[in-house]
Amino acid sequence: MKGQPSLPEELPDLYDAMADAYDRLDDWIVANWGEKPRPERADFLQKFWSSRTGEVRSVLEICCGTGLMLEQLALRGFDVAGLDRSEAMLGHARRRLGEQVPLVHAELPAIPVERQFDAVVSPGAALNYTSSREDLARTFRAVAHVLRPGGSFVFDILSPGMMADHAGSTVWAADLGDLAFVWAFADSADGRYSDATYTQFLRRADDAGGSYIRTREQHRLYTLDPEMIRSAAQDCGLTDGAVYDNYTFHPAHDGTRYETWAFTRA
């Protein structure tokens, strides 16, 4: 996302450092931060699509990472494609999904694909990296361009409550043996965003002595106002905005941590 701060040259691009351990980190986040497991997210998407007019066969995932969700959707028979800014993450996705799945290296708001899809998804809080209404609208406009009329766009974000109560100026850490990591969060003075420094220690696979590779990444996560999301979507031809509680069909509420948004292209 373009809203990320300028990083020192010694730091890798976002998600490149964690790519080799991302799948295990995702399992830890599901267990400790309350994210829905990806099979349950895929079940929700399939039920959501079946309740709407127009068959969903083709699905594009933006910010697809290592292909965990694409794999779930492919197992359910959908024709899938993915896009991500990290070549390292796409390398893992390619090994998981095979050569037949189109994977595009690009950074939002750019979506450089030449076809339209029945649905676009982003199930990993990727839009919390968007710094402004203008940048959010650019992404929505790009999504609408690759959606067929009547197609749906479903994404999740960290709710404002999650950003305020869960991230904050806190530290989260875990030692999984061959993998250890620390998430350190520091809020901006105005509460508009939280800077997250991720430090990872990954045991070298080729070193019998048990040495580790230490890497760091810096992420900036923005609090997204619901009315800003709705107005930006409406400006880009995305309508019928509904927001659910963490991949259930219950409406989002004050205690919701992960908001699941759904729009339709007019």
Image: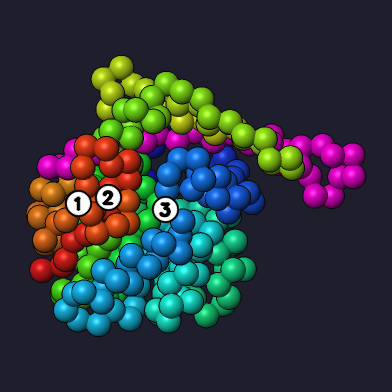
Q: Quadrant of residue 240?
A: bottom left
Q: Residue at x 17, y 42 (%)?
A: 226
Residue 251's label in the rendered image is 1
Which circle's residue, 3 or 1, is located before the other in the chain?
3
Quick one: quadrant of the C terminus?
bottom left
The magenta span reads: 200-228
Residue 9 in the image: state x and y as whole percent.
Answer: 56, 33
Disc 2 versus disc 1: distance between alpha carbons?
A: 6 Å
Residue 162 pos. (x, y %): 33, 35
Residue denoted by label 2: 245
Q: In the rendered image, is residue 52 in sight?
A: yes
Quarter of the figure with residue 57: bottom left
Whole-percent x, y for residue 118 in the image: 27, 76
Q: Which residue is mark 3?
A: 36
The answer to which image quadrant residue 204 occupies is: top right
Of residues 229 and 4, the one nearer the viewer is: 229
Q: Are marks 2 and 1 in contact (CB under 8 Å)?
A: yes
